[in-house]
């Protein structure tokens, strides 16, 4: 029987399979950020062991970095974490992309754009959205701090093999329907636990047609439906994206690498533990209404009512709507927004800024809206400036900020105030995620842009050019 893409990569990295136990898996790439690694490095010191393969590890601060001024971090806890990462990298000989340097940015943006994440790799990081890197055709998983210590010390990890699921998305996406909308649609259909215990492979015409940036957005959100990983088979789109990037193989090595990457696909006769198919015709621009990414509707739809719900479902929905200050059956389109956020490892790439600019060009930001436009890396910021997108944004009344996780989570100065409604391109709308008491609706860059102009939740199709 043939193998799935996941099985091919997994099997190529097995060091030993422990009978009735986990597998010892070789790890090609470990990424470290400042929040989840201090204890892991302390473990090495406690046990008096070094780092096994420092050349396979890259580190950068992203969660605590301010998006307005990176000369300093005022918060003492955040400053300590960033300084500790730098000191640990110096002590253990690990490449460190310092805050404010041209190499810095959100790990899940920087890894693929520098071609540090390549097809066929096993990639881990102490961060749940490591699933992002699966878009290049890799097994990429978020891990815990003790597992980070394992990889630092041995370049291996003990893992139980997940089941496999293929999600096919067939047809052609309509204009203004983006990868973010596809991800929010899948989550609404599958729920936020629908892929728990599985590694997902995305396939179908929609994926084949999708840009690399779109694929990274889709894989990024895999974790929000409980999936261990979200892979996409590498193809010409992948190779074109990676070719010539800083750490990509060069010359004859590139040709050899591409030849081997072409084998990285699921065989025709491979069988998945689960397989589902969705259709592009059913997917419209999306918006969330609740406090998990699966609680979403079409942007011109209405919030579900309690009709036909069990007592448990009714309580769950009521709890979410009470926090969000929404009502069952409410239409969200036209609801005033206070904050707009473009950025995060979900939608902080150049294509996202091009999309946002395409909508706001020739318009003005609404007076009632505070907008934070935060590139996912310094390279993205440079591209924005090189392409003149910053001028389009400035003409429309928007300020371009400095690369950071920013308002994706309330760990740096970019916090949405309590009670304010934020429409955000990030990946989590949990209670207080963007600031204590802040309310978040998730959407695509196009929907956020349209809403930033009108000051209310707006269907981007109304601005279709
Ligand atoms: S942008 Fe948000 S989800 Fe992504 S790594 Fe930063 S905090 Fe995590």
Image (cartoon, grey):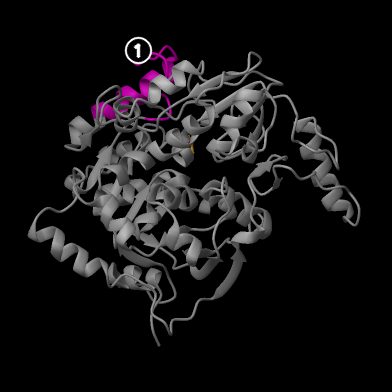
Quadrant in which the N terminus appears = bottom left
Residue 433 appears in the picture as rendered:
no
Residue located beneath label 1 in the image: 72
Range of residues picked out in magenta: 62-87
Q: Secondary structure at mark 1?
A: loop
Q: Is mark 1 within 8 Å of ligand 1?
A: no
- Against 337, residue 28 (above or below) is below
Does 287 appear in magenta?
Answer: no
In the rendered image, residue 438, in percent from the top left (x then y), is placed at: 66, 25
Residue 149 image point, x, y percent: 33, 46
Is 258 located above or below residue 50 in the figure? below
* Residue name at image x 21 percent, y 48 percent: 56
Identified at 44% across, 59% down, the residue is 209
Q: Is residue 358 visible?
A: yes
Q: Is residue 331 left or right of residue 282?
A: right
Which of these two is toward me, 42 or 397? 397
Q: Is residue 129 left or right of residue 241?
A: right
Most extreme residue toward the front is 465
Q: Is residue 72 magenta?
A: yes
The part of the image, by quadrant, that contains residue 233 is bottom left
Which residue is situated farthest in the bottom direction here?
1
Image height of 281 relative to 17, above or below:
above
Q: Residues within 10 Å of mark 1 (few under 14, many from 20)?
A: few
Name the quadrant of the C terminus: top right
Q: Which residue occupies the extreme right position in the image?
A: 307
Give residue 229's position: percent from left, percent from top.
46, 58
- Residue 310: percent from the left, percent from the top? 88, 56
Q: Quadrant of residue 169?
A: bottom right
Query: Which sits in the foreground, 125 or 167?
Result: 167
């Amino acid at each position: 029987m043939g193998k799935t893409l996941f099985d091919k990569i997994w099997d190529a990295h097995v060091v030993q399979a422990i009978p009735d136990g986990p597998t010892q898996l070789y790890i090609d790439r470990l990424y470290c950020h400042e929040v989840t690694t201090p204890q892991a490095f302390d473990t090495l010191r406690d046990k008096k062991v070094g780092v096994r393969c420092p050349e396979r590890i890259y580190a950068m601060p992203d969660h605590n970095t301010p998006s307005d001024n990176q000369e300093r971090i005022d918060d003492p806890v955040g400053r300590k974490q960033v300084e500790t990462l730098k000191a640990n990298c110096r002590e253990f000989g690990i490449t460190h992309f310092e805050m404010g340097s041209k190499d810095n940015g959100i790990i899940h943006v920087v890894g693929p754009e520098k071609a540090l994440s390549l097809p066929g790799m096993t990639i881990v990081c102490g961060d749940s959205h490591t699933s992002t890197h699966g878009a290049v055709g890799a097994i990429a998983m978020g891990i815990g701090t003790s597992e980070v210590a394992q990889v630092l010390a041995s370049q291996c990890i003990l893992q139980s093999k997940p089941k496999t699921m293929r999600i096919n998305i067939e047809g052609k996406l309509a204009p203004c329907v983006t990868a973010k909308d596809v991800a929010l649609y899948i989550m609404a259909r599958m729920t936020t636990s629908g892929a728990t215990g599985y590694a997902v492979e995305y396939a179908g015409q929609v994926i084949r047609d999708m840009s690399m940036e779109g694929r990274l957005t889709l894989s990024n959100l895999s974790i929000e439906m409980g999936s261990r990983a979200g892979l996409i088979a590498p193809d010409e789109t992948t190779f074109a994206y990676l070719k010539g990037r800083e750490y990509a193989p060069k010359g004859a090595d590139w040709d050899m690498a591409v030849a081997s990457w072409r084998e990285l696909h699921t065989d025709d006769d491979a069988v998945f533990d689960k397989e589902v198919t969705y259709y592009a015709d059913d997917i419209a621009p999306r918006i969330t209404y609740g406090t998990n990414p699966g609680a979403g509707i079409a942007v011109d739809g209405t919030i579900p009512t309690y009709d036909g719900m069990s007592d448990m479902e009714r309580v769950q929905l009521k709890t979410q709507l009470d926090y969000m200050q929404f009502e069952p059956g409410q239409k969200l389109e036209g609801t005033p927004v206070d904050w707009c956020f473009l950025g995060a490892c979900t939608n902080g790439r150049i294509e996202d800024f091009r999309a946002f600019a395409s909508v706001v060009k020739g318009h003005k930001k609404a007076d009632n809206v505070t907008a934070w436009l935060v590139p996912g890396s310094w390279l993205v910021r440079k591209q924005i400036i090189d392409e003149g997108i910053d001028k389009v944004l400035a003409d429309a009344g928007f300020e371009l900020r400095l690369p950071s996780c920013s308002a994706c989570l309330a760990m740096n100065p970019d916090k949405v105030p309590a009670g304010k409604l934020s429409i955000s391109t990030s990946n989590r709308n949990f209670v207080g995620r963007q600031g204590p008491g802040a309310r978040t609706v998730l959407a695509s860059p196009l929907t956020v842009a349209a809403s930033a102009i009108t000051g209310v939740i707006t269907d981007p199709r109304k601005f279709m050019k």
